[in-house]
Image (tube, helix red, strand yellow):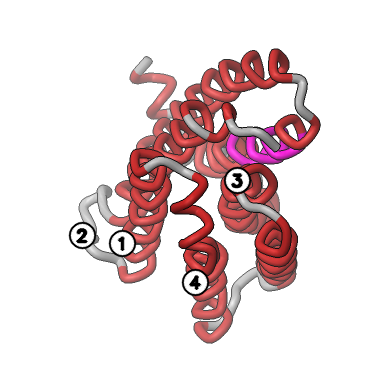
């Protein structure tokens, strides 16, 4: 086991994301079993997007931090890895957009979130070494997409129980704190364990909050 970990390009990061990828596959498998039994169109669409985004993000991150490949391949994986963050954010929100919200809230927020996410993904793939100004735009996009649902706070409160709201907000807070730690470089000591190694814990914790929100509450809602 330790020999396997030590052979990864970035041992700590790579191992954490491999764990995240395995856990996400297990989680989505359980979710899929329940969705198939429901046989509801929007549930299948929304949770398919969510599942692909969750498993995809952890898998790409695991590949980027683990594989010892050429520098050119590593650069490509890094760009895709960063782009997948947008996919996870909007993918995690998609079940809320399509199942929880109704009428104008559903399609207006869904459209805005996906337009911003696609723009963010495109920018991430275009800029290999983005200047500081573009990095700031990336971070702003993360926050806007992640907290866009706050605009529909009242409809959400009416549709979801308090416990579900707690899980939803907790996930958002964990992602935001993790992004702050990563971008501001808190806890960087230069000793091999710092912000970059702490970030996966926030991602996994936030992912669990939103998975439990979907598995425990949203999946039972009518379309």
State the residue in front, 96 or 122: 96
Q: Which residue is mark 3?
A: 100
Q: Nearer the viewer, mark 2 or mark 3?
A: 3
| Image position of 69 (left or right of 4) | right
Give the crowd class for mark 2: few <14, some 14-19, many >=20 residues within 10 Å.
Answer: some
Disc tally is: 4
How far across and down, in percent of the image, does residue 154 sit?
47, 61
Say if the magenta span includes residue 47: yes
Query: For the point 61% across and 17% down, which residue is it?
Result: 29
Give the crowd class for mark 4: few <14, some 14-19, many >=20 residues within 10 Å.
Answer: some
How far across and down, in percent of the image, does residue 43 sit?
71, 32
Q: Which residues are magenta?
A: 45-54
Task: Give the CA distance from mark 4 to mark 2.
Answer: 19 Å
Q: Are marks 1 and 2 in contact (CB under 8 Å)?
A: yes
Of all residues shown, which one is farthest toward the bottom? 133
Query: For the point 31% across and 62% down, which residue is it?
Result: 181
Q: Earlier in the sequence, mark 1 or mark 4?
A: 4
Q: Quadrant of the N terminus?
A: top left
Give the crowd class for mark 3: few <14, some 14-19, many >=20 residues within 10 Å.
Answer: many
Judged by its main secondary structure, the magenta piece is helix
Q: Are marks 3 and 4 in contact (CB under 8 Å)?
A: no
Q: Which residue is mark 1?
A: 181
Task: Give the CA distance from mark 1 to mark 4.
Answer: 12 Å
- Say if residue 121 shows up in the picture: no
Task: Give the CA distance from mark 3 to mark 4.
Answer: 27 Å
State the residue in front, 165 or 55: 165
Task: Give the CA distance from mark 1 to mark 3.
Answer: 31 Å
How far across and down, in percent of the image, does residue 119 sit?
72, 70
- Say if residue 192 shows up in the picture: yes
Q: Which residue is mark 2?
A: 187
How far across and down, in percent of the image, does residue 162 sit?
35, 44
């Amino acid at each position: 086991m330790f020999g396997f970990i030590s052979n990864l390009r970035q041992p700590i990061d790579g191992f954490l994301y491999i764990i995240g990828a395995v856990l996400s596959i297990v989680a989505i498998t359980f979710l899929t079993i329940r969705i198939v039994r429901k046989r509801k169109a929007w549930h299948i669409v929304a949770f398919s997007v969510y599942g692909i985004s969750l498993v995809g993000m952890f898998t790409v991150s695991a590949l980027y931090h683990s594989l010892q490949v050429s520098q050119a391949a590593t650069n490509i994986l890094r760009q895709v890895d960063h782009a997948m963050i947008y996919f996870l954010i909007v993918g995690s929100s998609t079940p809320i957009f399509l199942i929880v919200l109704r009428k104008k809230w559903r399609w207006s927020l869904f459209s805005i979130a996906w337009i911003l996410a696609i723009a963010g993904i495109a920018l991430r793939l275009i800029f290999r070494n983005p200047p500081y100004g573009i990095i700031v735009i990336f971070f702003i996009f993360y926050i806007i997409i992640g907290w866009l649902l706050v605009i529909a706070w009242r409809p959400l409160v009416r549709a979801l129980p308090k416990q579900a709201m707690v899980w939803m907000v907790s996930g958002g807070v964990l992602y935001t704190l993790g992004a702050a730690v990563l971008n501001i470089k808190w806890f960087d000591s230069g000793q091999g364990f710092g912000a970059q190694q702490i970030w996966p814990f926030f991602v996994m914790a936030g992912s669990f909050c939103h998975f439990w929100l979907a598995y425990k509450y949203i999946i039972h809602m009518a379309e």
